[in-house]
Image (cartoon, rainbow, N blue to C red):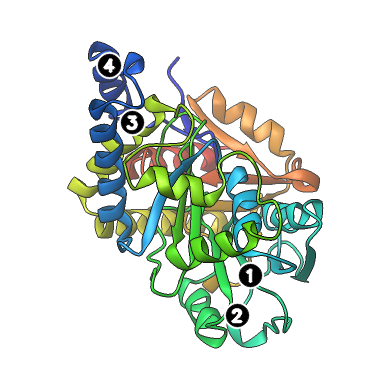
Amino acid sequence: MSLTFFTPGPAQLYPTFEQHLKAFVENQLGSISHRSQQYRDLHKFTVDQLRTLLDVPDSHAILFLGSASEAWERILFSTVELESFHLVNGSFSKKFYDYSNALNKYAHKFEKPMGEGFTASEIEVPEYAELIATTHNETSSGVQMPVAEIHKLKQRHPEKFIAVDMVSSAPYPELDYNLVDTAFFSVQKAFGLPAGLGVWIVSERCLKKAEYIRNQYSIGAHNDLPTLWKNAQNNETPATPNVMGIYLLGKVAEDFNRIGVSNIRKETEHKAELLYKFIEQAPGFSLFVKDKAIRSQTVIVADTISLSADIIKQIKTKGMVIGSGYGANKSTQLRIANFPATSVEETERLIYELGKL
């Protein structure tokens, strides 16, 4: 039985994935030199498609890493000499904070319980913090920080770097990169691709800070920002890249551009509205995130009366896979991914089957 995955990552593969993979194999792209013009053209195509899709200006480079988790370390090495500041309201925002401590930085945090969010007006940024680490979409809890609040936070603290984790929401958030210094995501969620590739969007201002810090401390020996940036100017990477992942990302980004990112955002909101309306009204389910303004549009979280494992098992017999809660909430919550790879019709079918339980 073919399954439809509503899991928050790895997630459902995008419908065009198979044809793009077939073209990659047929054209023997897995064997080309990463220093060849053929690779440089492939690399540039993907960067150009992402730049169009996400409206990334030329002041920012688009770089490729092994994962989004690697971006946490790269950002901290590159922008933080001494102190960072983290908005923590779930497991993944906390991991960013933990990485800073692991790198022997002085990490501050403003922490709220899972299910709660942040507004710019309530945030007091420590005077000497160099970086403000935000999470647009907290995958563990289904809380989304409104883009407007992220922008306001930067406007209040223009001298500080601001980083945006959009791992489980890109390309949904419409970020203004005149205000966002760096952002990052991975491909196994909303881009509907297999795991193994992280994308790091980073400003020239971050590069200059990284060069300054490198003159005093180590910023890592592998994939440091100045080296990544230098190679990217020639549409290359320092080490042999994930050519297949980069190629597939470019083709899916091209598909997204054909549809139009505004249309993708509208459909995402429509499917989210259907799911939230069901959860709010259906017996046995309730909304985990109480404040509508901060409910995620891409990872919908529901509290359940029944054990989530039992619900997941029953839904799988209908050909669909949904995610359990994260960490301590594994057995009492469901997390339903709402990514472009799943259609309105598939979402309606999931709601229908959940309603029959």
Q: Is residue 275 left or right of residue 30?
A: right
* Horizontal and vertical percent position of residue 223: 55, 41
Q: Amino acid at mark 1?
A: Leu
* Horizontal and vertical percent position of residue 69: 62, 44
Residue toward you, 256 or 308: 256
Report which residue position mark 2 lands on. Answer: 119
Q: Earlier in the sequence, mark 3 or mark 4?
A: 4
Q: Amino acid at mark 3?
A: Leu
Q: Residue at x 70, y 75 (%)?
A: 129
Q: Earlier in the sequence, mark 3 or mark 2?
A: 2
Question: Is there a contact, CB below 8 Å, between mark 4 and mark 2?
Answer: no
Q: Earlier in the sequence, mark 4 or mark 2?
A: 4
Q: Which mark is residue 131?
A: 1
Element under label 2? loop
Determine the image quadrant of residue 144: bottom right
Question: Is there a contact, CB below 8 Å, between mark 3 and mark 4?
Answer: no
Element under label 4? helix
The answer to whether residue 144 is visible is no
Q: Nearer the viewer's eye, disc 3 or disc 1?
A: 1
